[in-house]
Image: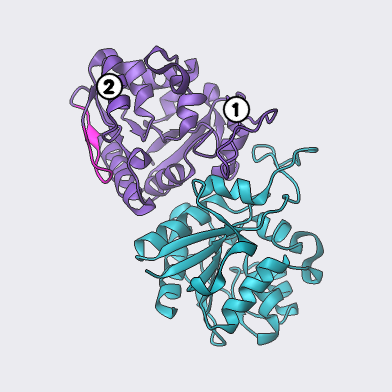
Chain colours: A purple, B cyan
Amino acid sequence: MKKIGVILSGCGFLDGAEIQETVLTLLAIDRAGAEAVCLAPDMQQHHVVNHLTGEIMAGEVRNVLAESARITRGAITVLNGIDLPEIDALVLPGGYGVAKNLSDFAFNGVGCQVNPDVAAAVQACYDAGKPLGFICIAPVIAAKVLGKESIELTIGNDPETAEALEALGAKHIDCPVWNTVVSSRGAVVSTPAYMLGPTIGEVAKGIEKLIGDIVRLI
Amino acid sequence: MKKIGVILSGCGFLDGAEIQETVLTLLAIDRAGAEAVCLAPDMQQHHVVNHLTGEIMAGEVRNVLAESARITRGAITVLNGIDLPEIDALVLPGGYGVAKNLSDFAFNGVGCQVNPDVAAAVQACYDAGKPLGFICIAPVIAAKVLGKESIELTIGNDPETAEALEALGAKHIDCPVWNTVVSSRGAVVSTPAYMLGPTIGEVAKGIEKLIGDIVRLI
């Protein structure tokens, strides 16, 4: 059975992984007859946000790996502990956790740094020709790590984020929520998801297409 | 557009709502052309469980409404504040939060009490002939509130929980994960979901069927 790594960044779109995108990714992988191998770095979240009020909860501390495990019912592995050769492809769902925990894009924009374990996993898969999938805001990770390769990516149609992707060396392609962009420069697929929304049903279409593309490219 | 209330109990299957079941419920509602109205009581969780280790995090305090809002991207209403006449149906996803926050079934079994706002919402919908859906462990709420009506319910095939449902006055029907039980005594539908599992794809089939049944019964 094909194994698809899924890197999570917490549990909740304001400070971690976008929960709906993550579950839709796991659903699409299962329905495609593949196996999801969920991964997350063992690190503290940048901060914790109250998802009812949108306010930062001062003094609250949560761990990315333990919170990610909520979505996966405990089935998760520390990212730096994974045997990457056993993974056939790698997918990153979105959520601010990508831009706050897996990187600091939310704070430093094009000057961002990517968590070394995440960057190493993305680079290793790319170098091995293993398909990579980036959902929602996650293409910023692809642009930062692989930007020099002029990868075609989409984050939907947000001009500011698209500009940042291009500044990092990637080529941004406008794309509707139900569709994907498959790069001509390597097996890299992206879909806008909740960068566009607006409904879970529309987001599901794009994610299902992305996983279908990934499985075909393995 | 038909409005379906969805009562959540937190965010994570060990101390709150089962995240995957909740997202699959929201997806099925959207795909059925209905609107989800997410609801949760504004109360502290019974406790917080580390989903990586399964251990209780002593001293950690989380709020059911604020944590539920993680799954719904902030779109949630306090349960006691909802205008029930505006809801056409009501669905409860599972997770231990149902048995720890919305009731104390996890601790007191057949001697359990149900949160008064949850009990009132279930009873009001039942009395008004509005369809009710119970997923995974949530049928214990139906059995406690409506047990005297001899409602047919399923939690899959777990003998101990099935016995508890019957002790509360309901009638338990064994059911596979992809199917639902529709009560002959009222518009009450249930599906086993992660009481059986094992995969998200199988759980999705049962939840999609449950939402289909609910929409037809409105």
Residue receiving disc 1: A47
Q: Main secondary structure of the magenta part?
A: loop
Q: Which residues are magenta?
A: A174-183
Residue receiving disc 2: A163
Q: Is A185 inside the magenta-drawn segment?
A: no
The answer, for residue B46, to whether it is visible in the render is yes
Q: Residue at x 48, y 53 (%)?
A: B23
Q: Nearer the viewer, residue B2 or A140?
A: B2
The answer, for residue B140, to whether it is visible in the render is no
Residue B67 sits above or below residue B59 on the image? below
Chain designation of label 2 = A
Q: Residue at x 41, y 47 (%)?
A: A24
Residue A113 location (% of width, % of height): 45, 14
Local SS, label 2: helix
Q: Residue furthest left?
A: A184
Q: Nearer the viewer, residue A35 or A191?
A: A191
